[in-house]
Image (tube, rainbow, N blue to C red):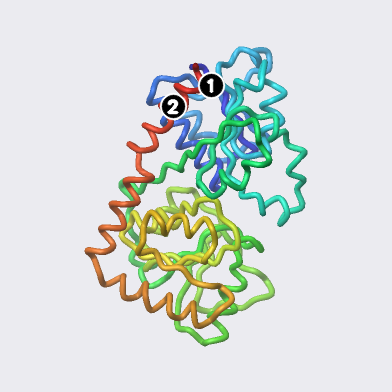
């Protein structure tokens, strides 16, 4: 198939990285890919390495499949494709995202779609009433930690990933630590240090290439996420694949992940006691190599190359019928 991939941007955030992993798989399976984006960024080079062609408007109606990555690119895909039956969207935003950031979910053509994929099953069910005529499928993200080096400078730190924003809830995490004077070191990956807060024992590395982010996650003691909303926490899965424990907020995406990997520890970000108990649990897990190795095996089963490749092949075959 000749497939057009549409991305809202090409930075190191989760959705563009997920699209890159999909592109790698499509090329491996023998498909030709082209790329259109609203905003260029450092990942563009990685798509070029795969042989992705730049979107050519004069050939806009000639693609076999139009793949919209995130809800933001759905209108462009629907307007470009000859018909909606050749458009598929991979939606990476939970429905509460629209309310949290003031987007009108009815303005993006989601109800006009015939095919849509979601990383998490809970998301699929969330959108069902909004997309009554659409075939909804789960497509989990591909997550790997192949040949990732470890840096001993960060082995005492917990990784906290994502830009500093309300959805990621880092401020609440800091508040929990300060309230109880907890002796813990955090390494904020993807976030700039807020000017109005003091963090003597924590690191802020800002946005870095995803290969560097993987190294920092693998090198850490574990990972903590106090997020209010996630679709599928890629960094948490990367930490598990690195034989590290994770402490995650008790939200739908993390509960679904725990249903696959039962030893994941959840906590209530608004409850200091819950947080302290969770820290004690992950500290105990850190010394249990057998348990961490078991978690890694489960994560690879659900999010590894084989499972992802099989699912993509099946879904693309359905689209071609």
Name the spot of residue 250 as percent of width and height, x first.
52, 66
Residue drawn where x is 56% and y is 55% of the image: 230
Residue 175 drawn above or below residue 100: below
Tell whether label 2 touches label 1 (CB within 8 Å). yes
Residue drawn where x is 45% and y is 83% of the image: 183
Name the side, left or right, on which 271 lies relative to 211: right
Name the spot of residue 261 as percent of width and height, x first.
36, 57
Secondary structure at badge 2 equals: helix
Find the distance from the CA under tag 1 to the CA under tag 2.
Answer: 9 Å
Foreground residue among 76 and 105: 105
Residue 3: mark: 1
Q: Which residue sits furthest left? A: 290
Residue 203 drawn above or below residue 31: below
Foreground residue among 55 and 126: 126
Residue named by callout 2: 26
Residue 1 drawn above or below residue 122: above
Foreground residue among 9 and 286: 286
Name the side, left or right, on which 101 lies relative to 37: right
Residue drawn where x is 52% and y is 17% of the image: 2
Secondary structure at badge 1 equals: strand
Residue 183 drawn above or below residue 138: below
Name the side, left or right, on which 55 lies relative to 32: right
């Amino acid at each position: 198939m000749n497939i057009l991939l549409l991305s809202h941007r090409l930075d190191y955030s989760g959705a563009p990285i997920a699209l890159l992993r999909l592109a790698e798989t499509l090329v491996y399976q023998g498909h030709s890919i082209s790329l259109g984006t609203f905003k260029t960024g450092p990942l563009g080079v990685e798509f070029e390495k795969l042989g992705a062609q730049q979107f050519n408007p004069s050939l806009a109606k000639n693609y076999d499949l139009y793949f919209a990555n995130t809800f933001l690119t759905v209108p462009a895909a629907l307007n470009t494709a000859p018909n909606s039956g050749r458009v598929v969207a991979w939606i990476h935003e939970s429905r509460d995202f629209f309310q949290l950031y003031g987007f009108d979910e009815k303005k993006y053509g989601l109800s006009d779609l015939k095919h849509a994929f979601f990383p998490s099953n809970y998301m699929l069910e969330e959108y069902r009433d909004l997309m009554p005529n659409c075939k909804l499928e789960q497509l989990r993200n591909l997550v790997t930690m192949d040949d990732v080096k470890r840096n001993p400078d960060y082995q005492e730190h917990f990784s906290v990933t994502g830009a500093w924003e309300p959805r990621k809830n880092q401020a609440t995490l800091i508040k929990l630590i300060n309230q109880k004077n907890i002796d813990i070191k955090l390494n904020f990956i993807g976030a700039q240090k807020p000017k109005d807060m003091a963090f003597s024992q924590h690191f802020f590395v800002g946005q870095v290439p995803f290969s560097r982010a993987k190294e920092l996650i693998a090198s850490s003691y574990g990972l903590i996420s106090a997020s209010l909303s996630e679709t599928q926490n890629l960094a948490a899965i990367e930490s598990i694949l690195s034989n590290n424990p994770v402490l995650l907020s008790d939200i739908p995406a993390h509960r679904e992940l725990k249903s696959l990997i039962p030893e994941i520890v959840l906590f209530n970000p608004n409850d200091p006691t819950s947080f302290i108990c969770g820290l004690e649990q992950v500290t105990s897990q850190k010394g249990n190599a057998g348990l961490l190795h078991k978690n890694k095996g489960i994560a690879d089963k659900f999010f590894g190359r084989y499972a992802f490749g099989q699912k993509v092949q099946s879904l693309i075959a359905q689209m071609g019928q």
